[in-house]
Image (spheres, rainbow, N blue to C red):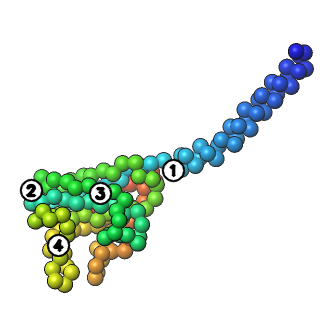
C-alpha cells in the first residue's frame, strides 16, 4: 500500500468515526432524556398501629385518584410519619393519593354522602373542595427525581 492510499484510508476511517459519533448523538441524548428517576413521598398524620397506609402513584389525569395506578405500596403504620420511595419511574408528572385503612378492608371507607371516614391525602398537600383535587394541583414533576408531602386528614 502506498503512502497516499494509507492517508486516504486513514482520512476515510476518521470521517466514518466522526460521522458515527454525530449520528449516535441523538440516540444518546434521547436515552439521557428518558433516564428513570425516583419519587420520594413523606406521609404524615398517621395514627400509629391502626391499620395499613396505602400509597398509590398515578401518571394520568383521567385515572387519578380512583382508576388504574402506575404503582402502589401498602405500608405498616408504626409511626406518625413515614417515607416511601418509588424507583425507576420515567420522567413526567405524577399525582399521589394515600389513605390509612383503619378497619383493614383494603379500601377507603366513605359514609352515605361519599365523604371518607378514614384519613386520606394527596401529593403537594392538595385538597379538593367537593371531592379529590384535580391531577394538576397534586402533580409532582420527575426530572429525573421528585419529592412531595402528603398529610393524612
Q: Are marks 2 and 1 in contact (CB under 8 Å)?
A: no
Image x and y of residue 23, in percent: 69, 42
Which residue occupies 53% across, 50% down? Answer: 33
Q: CA distance from mark 2 to mark 1?
A: 39 Å
Q: Is residue 88 left or right of residue 99?
A: right
Q: Are marks 1 and 4 in contact (CB under 8 Å)?
A: no
Residue hosting label 1: 34
Q: Return the mark for residue 72.
A: 3
Image x and y of residue 114, in percent: 21, 81
Residue closer to the observer: 44 or 9: 9
Tell me the crowding category of disc 4: few under 14, some 14 to 19, or many 20 or more residues within 10 angstroms, Cα based.
some
- Helix, strand or loop status at disc 4: loop
Sequence-wise, which precedes: disc 3 or disc 2?
A: 2
Sequence-wise, which precedes: disc 1 or disc 4?
A: 1
Of tags 1 and 4, which is closer to the observer? 4
Q: Return the mark for residue 109.
A: 4
Image x and y of residue 150, in percent: 26, 63
Amino acid at each position: 500500500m502506498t503512502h497516499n492510499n494509507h492517508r486516504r484510508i486513514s482520512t476515510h476511517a476518521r470521517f466514518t468515526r466522526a460521522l458515527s459519533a454525530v449520528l449516535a448523538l441523538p440516540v444518546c441524548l434521547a436515552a439521557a432524556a428518558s433516564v428513570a428517576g425516583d419519587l420520594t413521598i413523606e406521609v404524615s398524620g398517621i395514627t400509629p398501629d391502626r391499620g395499613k397506609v396505602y400509597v398509590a402513584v398515578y401518571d394520568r389525569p383521567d385515572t387519578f385518584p380512583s382508576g388504574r395506578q402506575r404503582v402502589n405500596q401498602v405500608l405498616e403504620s408504626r409511626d406518625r410519619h413515614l417515607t416511601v420511595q418509588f424507583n425507576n419511574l420515567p420522567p413526567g408528572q405524577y399525582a399521589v393519593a394515600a389513605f390509612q385503612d383503619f378497619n383493614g378492608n383494603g379500601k377507603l371507607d366513605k359514609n352515605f354522602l361519599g365523604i371518607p371516614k378514614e384519613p386520606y391525602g394527596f401529593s403537594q398537600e392538595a385538597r379538593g373542595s367537593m371531592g379529590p383535587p384535580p391531577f394538576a394541583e397534586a402533580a409532582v414533576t420527575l426530572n429525573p427525581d421528585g419529592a412531595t408531602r402528603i398529610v393524612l386528614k
